[in-house]
Amino acid sequence: MLSERMESSNYIPTYSCLLVLLRNLILEREPVYGIAEWSKQFEPSMIGLLPDLVNRINDDRIGRSLDLLYDSDRGSILTELVVRIVRDFHISMEEFHNDSTTITFSGNYSEADGLVKRGKESLKITHGHNKDHRQDLKQLLWTLTVSADHSVPVHYMALDGNTADTDTHID
């Protein structure tokens, strides 16, 4: 599905870079600059690569892939994915559960100021009511809505760090 929706270089498909990044986040959480070396410890097919592509993964390509993902219509991609899963696995959409959490950040994020970047409104990493009781750290608010039937994720939102949690349940 990503291959149909996202531009790719002839050298390595964008979706391949993104899926390697996702697998890394799930398995180990190496920094982006370490993913190339990390990926070499696996049989390429185990991380979704053809054998000749494992040596083409590097931090610049992953960065460009993330840029392409940012520029894509992520809402349509997620909607198509959810519709396919609901249809293929007969998931009931009668009842939903919603929850939120804060994602904390340390450091200076001057570009995460809520202003429009490349035609899209950016998020504002800022201080807010932190669920981890870390008032010293900046944050974003993350909400996730899942189906009551098998807890399939059907919607998410990343919101500015000072967004009130109670307002997100209405949306």
Image: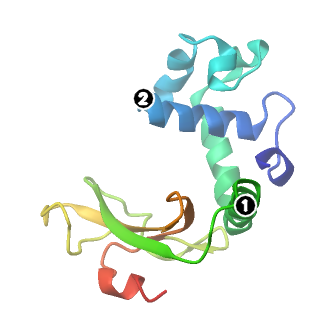
The amino acid type of the residue labelled 1 equals Ile
Is 170 above or below relative to 27? below
Identify residue type, mark 2.
Glu
Could you tell me residue 95's position as x and y percent?
52, 76
- Which quadrant of the figure has residue 154? bottom right
Residue under pointer 1: 77
Q: Quadrant of residue 132?
A: bottom left
Q: Mark 1 vs mark 2: which is more N-terminal?
A: 2
Q: Position of residue 149 (x, y in %)?
A: 54, 63
Image position of 94 (left or right of 13) = left
Left/right of residue 2 with respect to residue 116 in the rendered view? right
Instruction: Give the numbered dot on residue 30.
Output: 2
Name the residue nearer the viewer: 103 or 46: 46
Q: Is residue 143 left or right of residue 139?
A: right
Mark 2 neighbour density, 10 Å: few (under 14) some (14–19) many (20 or more): some
Give me the residue at 80% from left, 51% from top: 6
Percent x, y for residue 50?
A: 77, 18
The residue depicted at 69 percent of the width and 62 percent of the height is 86
Colour logic: rainbow
Helix, strand or loop at disc 2? loop
